Each structure stands twice: as structure tokens, then as C-alpha cells.
Image (cartoon, grey):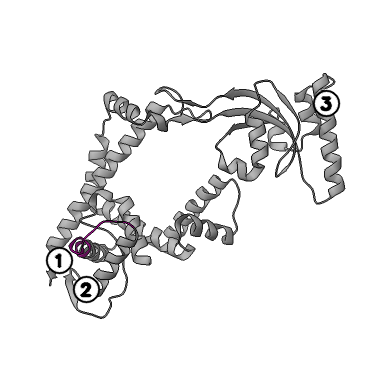
Amino acid sequence: MRNKRLTLILIVLFIFAINLFAAPLGGSTLLGTPAATVNLIRNRAITNEEVDETLREYQEAGVQADRTQILNVMINDEVFLQGAERDGVVISDQMLDQVMAQQRASIEAQVGQSLTDEEYEQILLSQAGITYQEYREDIREQLLVNQYLSMKKGSEIQDQAANIQISESTIDTFYRRNRQNFYSPENVRLAHIFIPYTDDDAENEANAALLIDVAEQIKNGTITFEQAVQDYSKDDESKSIGGDIGWLTMDNTSARTGLGDAFVDTVVMMRPGEVSGMLESNLGYHIVKVSVHNDGRILGLDDTISPEDSMTVRDYIRQVLSQQEANNIMANALNDLINELRNEARVRIY
């Protein structure tokens, strides 16, 4: 299924150029009758069997395309590969390793923890349906496309991108058409007193009893929450800032995975100034104090997109529309490069 997967990657990257260029990148020539031959620096036959296989994989992926379109994208793919080789575009293992490390760090940031190699590959399999090695080859091929396009059309792309302007009326129209998507879920800002689980059941029971007692002392005014943070919390990172651990939203799947649904649901329902009793999460024992509570609502254009972000909805829409324009510019530049390479190559369609 590799051909289909790589094709879909380039459809995402260059969706406006689908009729002119797409993957699969590479792949050995199958035995059979030729549908076309391509020669820029070498002769390469594209067989009817290859075309049929790629068409079938498109159809299995739900992409509508006919046989003529498939053959054209395969021809374009081949002239692109030969052009990149002719012009000395090489993706080194060092470059690939660096990008792969960045991609992994991004995924780890999303899940909120470091991942073993096995866990990382399991995420790739579950979310993208590919192995680590397949993902690595996909990244290599994306880098090849981007680097060759930058080499041949970089200044043209930059000049056009520098002139992108998104009007206020365009932003307003986009917002009105998509208002329902700019929803901020119910959220709270919280601080906590925290004691993590240990491997000793007796110690865990003692810690739970301790925080039950501390919560009672806070309730009757014997000790303040802030003082209890200093005296009892084992979360050194938040201890120096009064136990503050930021914002928690009702739809935060990472928090629900790490802390547990019961903990998240209880905390998000708390009101400003409220201090909980002892709460148990997947990580240990807590006493929580909420300082801010926001109900879920549709955001206005000048609201921030989240409590932790300074970017407004207006800024976000401008960024999205600017990126769409930049993608159009890249797709058009890619079309031009493909056409130039096809004019230089000897292409015969049978």
C-alpha cells in the first residue's frame, strides 16, 4: 500500500496541483507493457500494471481520478525525480535525522511525555497507519520536493508571498461562515497541592489521609491554601508559584488521559475561589484551588483563541488565509516547474 500513502501525502501538500503532479516517489519498474516512457537523464518506462495498481490504490483511498490523470501524475513524478537528481538535490541522512527528531519532539509535546521507540511507532501506526521506516521515507520525499522547489522557484515564491494581503472584509466573511468552529470549551485556571503515588501502599494511604486532613484545615481556616502548598506539596515546579499549574479545559484529551476523567470533570465544575477536598487522579493525590472559571462559548473576532494564548481569532483567521494563499503560490510554482521539466524531457505516451 506504499504507493497510495505517498500519493496522499503529496495531495495534502499540493492539492491544487493534483492533475499535474503527485507521488508515488520512486518504486521499481514492474514487468509489463509500457503506458509511457520518460527520459530526462535516463529512460524510464511506466508500465500499464503500475498505472492500474496506482489507480486502484487511489480508489481504495476514496480519491476520484481516472486512468489518464494517474498516468500524468506518474509521468510528472518521474520527470521531477530525474530533474532533482540532475540538479544535485540530495537529502542527507543527517538532515533527515534532524527533521525526524523535531517531528518526534512535537508528538511528545502533544501527548505530554517522552515516548519509547515502541510507543512512538505505535502512535504512527494508530494515527497514520504507517511504520516508522515508512514515515521516515515519507519525510525524506517531502524534503526532496520542498528543497528542489525552493532551489528552482524559491525567489519567485518569496516575492509573491511577501505581497500576500488579507483584507478585513475577507476575515469577517470567513468568521461568519465558520463562527461555530470558534468555540471555547469550559475551562478553569487551577493551582494544586500534590503528592504523587509511590510503590508502597501503606505510604499512599498515609498521604491520602494527610491531604484529607490538610483540606479540612484549609476549610476551617487553620491554614491557608498557599501555606499548605509550601508545607505539603511535592510538585516542586509549581510550588514556587503558589501551586499554579495553568489552564484545564473540558475537552483536553491529554489531561484526561494523564489525570483521569473523574479528576478533570470534578475540577472543571469548580467555581472561582473554591478549594476542593482531597482528589485522586491517575498520578496521585491533590487539593485543588480554582482562580478562574470560564463557561463554554462562541468566541468573538477579538477574543483570544485560548486562555493561554495572546493570538486573537482575527489574527488566527488572517494566519490561516495567508497560509492558504502561500500554498496556492507554491502549487502554482510547482506546476510551472513540472511543465518546464516535461518540456525538457522526452515523454512518449503509448
Which segment is the magenta one? 62-72
Left or right? Give the position of 294 relative to 47. right
For disc 2, the marked residue is 48
Residue type for callout 2 = Asn
Give the residue at x 20% y 52%. Answer: 335
Residue type for callout 3 = Glu
Relative depth, front residue between 81 and 6 = 6
The spot of residue 275 in percent (x, y) is 73, 25
Q: Nearer the viewer, mark 3 or mark 1?
A: 3
Picture layout, residue 326 above or below residue 61: above
- CA gap, disc 1 to disc 2? 20 Å
Give the residue at x 19% y 55%. Answer: 337
Residue type for callout 1 = Ala
Q: Mark 1 or mark 2: which comes first in sequence?
A: 2
Could you say whether the residue bearing mark 3 is in a helix, strand or loop?
helix
Question: Residue 313 is drawn in which quadrant?
Answer: top left
For disc 1, the marked residue is 345
Queried whether the magenta region covers residue 87, the answer comes back as no
Numbered mark located on residue 216 in the image: 3
- CA gap, disc 2 to disc 3? 77 Å
Quarter holding the C terminus is bottom left
How many residues crowd mark 3 within 10 Å: few (<14), some (14–19), many (20+)?
A: some
Quarter holding the N terminus is bottom left
Q: Residue furthest bottom?
A: 31
Does the residue at mark 2 contact the one at mark 3 (Cβ under 8 Å)? no
